[in-house]
Image (cartoon, rainbow, N blue to C red):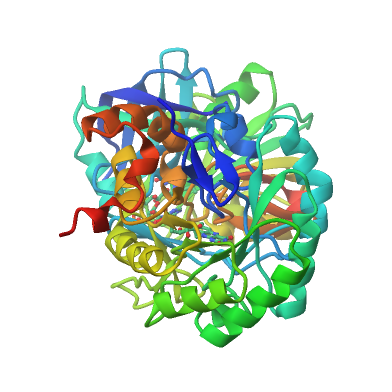
């Protein structure tokens, strides 16, 4: 189900130089999986901005966003109490019913947020999960304490300023995991596909509608053309490999 | 209030028709609201063979509008008839405009023939104005003789009224309109998207993978109004106007310059409930304008000119 919901901002916290955590109070009934996203209307901007839901409960939801352009800049200046219109809920989300012995949750940069809600769910199901978080540099890190309180969390940075030096895939030992959930930049997703491991990956695309009608976001898969916004953003490793 | 209009024999309960490419095959919108409230809707541009379309990114944001270079992604005419129409009929009792694309005369003719046979189709909308395909598309819509030839060829096999959708990327849209009406078009729809471009100032790279893409949305409205006015004043067949329509007031503007009905495009993408809102708003907006019968709005700009 998709609704046009008017949310009230209850907090808009700066987590590091460019990443913010925004808490939105309002209807979350349409959400049913981790990895779904909302599409935010901003004044003066023709298109909405797709942002993953990091976590939600019956009273509201949390998003984490990085300021990369004018729209996210505008969001970062919004104050507690302001209203925000967003389409909720979009996308398929992660299938958390998979049974696996040892699961890796792999996030790169602002790909981490949807893995937070997922980590909570998988933990409550008693699954064995490890969080692998990749950043460019130590100053980009955020939410490490939050993840650590849920599951063992390892960090990699491209410049070696924190954790292991290198890409997030360097944090996985051969044969250590039998399943993964991932969200992050496409090179990271491609590297994961190359490992041969089974899993699910969340993709991004420039979107116009976000609910499957404009064909602005199609990608080719083993199962034919799929819309990242509606059939995704989560795809299986099997169909993308 | 009676909002019905008549497009040369096609009766619609109201003049609001979601535009091709912004409403899919109706199924996603049927989950959001009862799409039977619409006058009709125009299906995604459908070609004889399935098409994947252009590489990503296909979308860019622009001031008061957007660019798309989708490139007519569609499952092909047979799949639309066998898979999409049966599903649509379960949620939709009215009829659709079958927007037809192609890359040469034969492919247009074959797709129009297949789709026009279907009961659910009230009219064919011949898209000779898509800027996002290499062969065919806009190449037909920007050359008056080619536009006339393809109209005549499709008209021969088309079992339903034939509307031809015109490109704004021409010097004289009126000349093309006159030619296609002469060749047998039963109606005109316009405008398709304007060729445009968006560039990243940091990298110098075009935003869309195919650099030249189609501009739509509020930004094109003044151009669209001018073109609908020019065409509606020149031809005697019904004209359906579109380009940047976002409100019931916009609907009145397009009908004033001569449109008998309107199509709403890009706004469906940013506000999926917009057509419902427009239809609900129309009675109040008409009364505010002191209008009793919506049909009396059609062409009133010229009547009040002097
Ligand atoms: C399904 C999905 C989930 C996302 N989740 C998050 C998230 O949780 N946190 C986060 O920080 N970012 C997320 N993004 C990326 C986010 O949508 C963009 O960073 C944001 O739209 C940029 O807007 P802007 O106005 O600041 O940038 P501008 O560059 O000014 O935007 C111009 C246009 O390009 C689009 N655009 C620019 N970059 C992207 C991008 N990377 N992906 C898609 N569209 C883009 C914008 O939406 C807008 O239409 C997600 C994207 C998708 C598709
Ligand atoms: C994403 C997108 C896809 C489109 N696809 C088609 C198409 O398949 N066939 C067609 O005739 N027009 C297509 N159009 C053009 C619209 O139907 C319409 O003519 C144009 O967008 C102007 O109206 P608007 O400003 O209300 O969007 C498309 C437009 C958009 C934005
Ligand atoms: S963004 Fe419109 S179909 Fe995905």
Could you tell me which quadrant the C terminus of chain B lies in?
A: bottom left
Question: Which image quadrant for residue B102?
Answer: bottom right
B212 is higher (above) or lower (below) than B88: below
Query: Is A38 above or below relative to B168?
Result: above
x, y percent for residue A143:
40, 35
The structure residue drawn at horizontal position 22% and vertical position 30%, both measured from the top left corner, is: B288
Answer left or right for A195 relative to A82.
right
Q: Quadrant of the N terminus of chain B?
A: top left
- In which quadrant of the rendered view does residue B37 lie? top right
Q: Quadrant of residue B301?
A: bottom left
Give residue B22's position: percent from left, percent from top: 53, 50
Viewer-nearest residue: A43 or A204: A43
In the figure, is residue A170 to the left or right of B191? Answer: right
Whether residue B135 is visible? no
Report how many numbered discs are placed on residues in the image: 0
Judge left or right: residue B211 versus residue A119: left
Q: Closer to the camera, B99 or B234?
A: B234
Q: Nearer the viewer, residue A39 or B183?
A: B183
Image point (60%, 46%), residue name: B10
Residue A124 visible, this angle = yes
Residue at the image position 75 percent from the left and 71 percent from the top: B156
Nearer-the-camera pick, B181 or B176: B181
On the image, the x and y values in percent for residue B9 come to 60, 48
Q: In this rendering, is residue A211 above or below B44?
A: above
* Residue A36: x %, y % from top left: 55, 34
């Amino acid at each position: 189900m998709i609704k046009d919901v008017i949310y009230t901002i209850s907090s808009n916290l700066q987590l590091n130089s460019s990443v913010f955590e925004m808490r939105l109070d309002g209807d979350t009934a349409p959400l049913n999986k981790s990895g779904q996203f909302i599409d935010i209307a901003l004044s003066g901007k023709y298109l909405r901005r797709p942002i993953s839901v990091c976590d939600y409960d019956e009273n509201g939801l949390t998003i984490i966003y990085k300021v990369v352009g004018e729209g996210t800049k505008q969001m970062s200046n919004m104050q507690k109490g302001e209203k925000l219109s967003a389409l909720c809920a979009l996308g398929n989300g992660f299938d958390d019913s998979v049974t696996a012995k040892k699961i890796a949750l792999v996030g790169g940069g602002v790909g981490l947020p949807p893995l937070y809600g997922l980590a909570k769910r998988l933990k409550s199901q008693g699954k064995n999960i490890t969080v692998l978080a990749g950043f460019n540099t130590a100053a980009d890190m955020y939410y490490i304490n939050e993840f650590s309180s849920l599951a063992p969390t390892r960090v990699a940075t491209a410049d070696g300023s924190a954790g292991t030096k290198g890409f997030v895939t360097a944090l996985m030992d051969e044969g250590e995991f039998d399943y993964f959930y991932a969200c992050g930049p496409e090179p990271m997703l491609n590297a994961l596909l190359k490992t041969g491991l089974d899993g699910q990956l969340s993709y991004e695309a420039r979107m116009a509608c976000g609910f499957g009608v404009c064909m602005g976001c199609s990608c080719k898969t083993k199962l034919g053309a799929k819309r990242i916004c509606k059939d995704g953003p989560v795809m299986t490793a099997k169909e993308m490999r | 209030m009676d909002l019905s209009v008549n497009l040369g024999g096609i009766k619609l309960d109201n003049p609001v028709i979601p535009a091709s490419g912004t409403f899919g095959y109706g199924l996603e919108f049927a989950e959001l609201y009862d799409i039977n409230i619409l006058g009709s809707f125009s299906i995604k541009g459908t070609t004889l063979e399935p098409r994947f379309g252009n590489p990503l990114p296909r979308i860019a944001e622009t001031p008061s509008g957007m660019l798309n270079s989708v490139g007519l992604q569609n499952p092909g005419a047979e799949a639309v008839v066998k898979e999409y129409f049966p599903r649509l009929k379960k949620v939709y009792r009215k009829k659709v405009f079958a927007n037809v694309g192609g890359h040469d005369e034969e492919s247009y003719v074959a797709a129009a023939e297949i789709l026009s046979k279907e009961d659910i189709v009230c009219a064919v909308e011949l898209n000779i104005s898509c800027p996002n395909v290499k062969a065919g598309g806009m190449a037909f819509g920007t050359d008056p003789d080619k536009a006339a030839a393809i109209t005549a060829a499709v008209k021969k096999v088309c079992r339903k009224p034939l509307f031809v959708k015109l490109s704004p990327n021409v010097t004289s849209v009126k000349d093309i309109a006159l030619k296609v009406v002469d060749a047998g078009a039963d109606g005109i729809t316009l405008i398709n998207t304007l060729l445009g471009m968006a560039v990243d100032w940091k990298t110098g790279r075009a935003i869309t993978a195919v650099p030249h893409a189609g501009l739509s949305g509020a930004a094109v409205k003044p151009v669209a109004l001018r073109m609908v006015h020019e065409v509606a004043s020149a031809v005697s067949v019904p004209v359906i106007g579109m380009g940047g329509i976002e409100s019931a007031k916009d609907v009145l503007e397009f009908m004033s310059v001569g449109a008998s009905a309107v199509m709403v495009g890009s706004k469906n993408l940013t506000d999926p409930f917009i057509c419902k809102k427009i239809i609900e708003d129309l009675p109040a907006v008409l009364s505010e304008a002191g209008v009793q019968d919506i049909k009396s709005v059609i062409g009133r700009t010229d009547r009040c000119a002097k």
